[in-house]
Image (tube, helix red, strand yellow):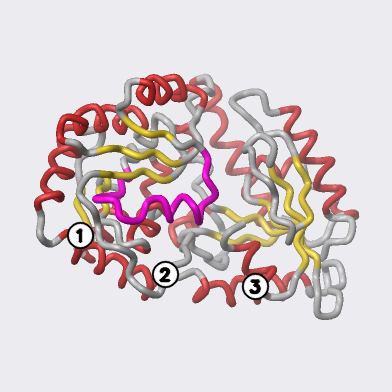
Amino acid sequence: MHRQIRALLEAGHEVTYVAPFTHCNVTASTRVRAIDVPRAVGRRRRRAIRAARRALRLGTRDADLLIVHDMELLFALPSARRRPPVVWDVHEDTEGALAAKVYLPEWVRRVLPPLIRRVAARAERRLHLILAEDAYQERFARPHPVVRNTTYVPEKPPQPPGENRVVYVGHLSEVRGAVELIEVARRLAPYGIRVDLVGPADVAVRPLLRDAQREGLLDWFGYVPNRHALRMAEGALAGLSLLHDLPNYRQSLPTKVIEYMAHGIPVITTPLPMAAAMVNQVGCGTVVPFQDVDAVVRAVLRLREDPEKAAMGVRGHTEALRRHHWPDHAVEFVRQLEEWAAAPDGVPAQARRRAVAV
């Protein structure tokens, strides 16, 4: 919504947005045609897939292009004769992400990889693909355009880091460090440092977060629209990214790291290759070992006393503005979609304005 759809709307296109608005307690923008669907949760996904199939049939009736962002939606596409050209936005290593799906039985996680590879190969033959990372090219036989998960970067450096608050912005789950975040909050409380968590949470960790909030250890705000969440984060002493060492995370630069940098917040991250390389190269934060609460607490306390913390925020913001400002990439993204929508083998493009279902 905040990058791709906004870019399409600003280019003069009409957008139908299929998403679980009710589940996320979100009111859709009046600038899009919204189709609400249930959220697929855990292993109970059949109802959501059926609803998605109906929604995509409805949403693509007058569309010149369909973009899907989830491999499961490839099973919900309208028939080839009744749909426009389809773009699969590959925004994760689907096979590598299985390790994070703890709700799946172990035997399912063992048998799924060959199926995922077959589905991906079939999609590559029949659909257009865009990739969120260069590393994802290894999963496919042919090269495909790369559209990275960048962000909107304020032109002016935001307020400098404070001293008594650290933040996490994003989805909360065990493999994204939710348990460590709670313990970090417990250890930092005696030092007068508050932990703010902004984002929805997996069912498994919600009771832990509620208990920690009732104890007064942290503030968990739940889902907040991205632009408001990042505004809430400004002025924090540090932005935390405590992802575990899983295959899906090793090949990508966490968006939250770029978002912290964009808003002048020093970063504390686990040593995933791309995140660690970015933070060390730019000098905008600290790298800590995986699942090491003691190291995180020490990093926060050192940062509070570090006279360089404001400079870290400035360096991060400067690098984000130079290389990761979404409008610098949006033109190429929109141009590629327009090219596919106008291709002879797709639905003929309308003059000047095209409807795009997302």
Q: Is residue 224 magenta?
A: yes
Residue 250: x and y in percent read 36, 47
Q: Which structural element holds mark 2?
A: loop
Is residue 336 found left or right of 318 in the rendered image? Answer: right
Residue 322: x and y in percent read 36, 75
Q: CA distance from mark 2 to mark 1?
A: 22 Å
Q: CA distance from mark 1 to mark 3?
A: 33 Å
| Residue drawn 39% across the image and 33% down it | 175
- Mark sitting on residue 62: none
Q: Which structural element holds mark 1?
A: helix
Which image quadrant is residue 345 in?
bottom right
Identify residue for label 2. Answer: 154
Which of the two labelled residues, at mark 1 and mark 3, occupies the earlier sequence position? Answer: 1
Residue 8: x and y in percent read 68, 68
Tell me if mark 2 has few (under 14), some (14-19) or many (20+) residues whose alpha carbon lies within 10 angstroms of its own: some
Identify residue for label 1. Answer: 280
Identify residue type, mark 2: Pro
Q: Which structural element holds mark 3?
A: helix
Identify residue for label 3. Answer: 334
Identify residue type, mark 1: Asn
- Viewer-side residue, 137 vs 154: 154
Which of the two labelled residues, at mark 2 and mark 3, occupies the earlier sequence position? Answer: 2
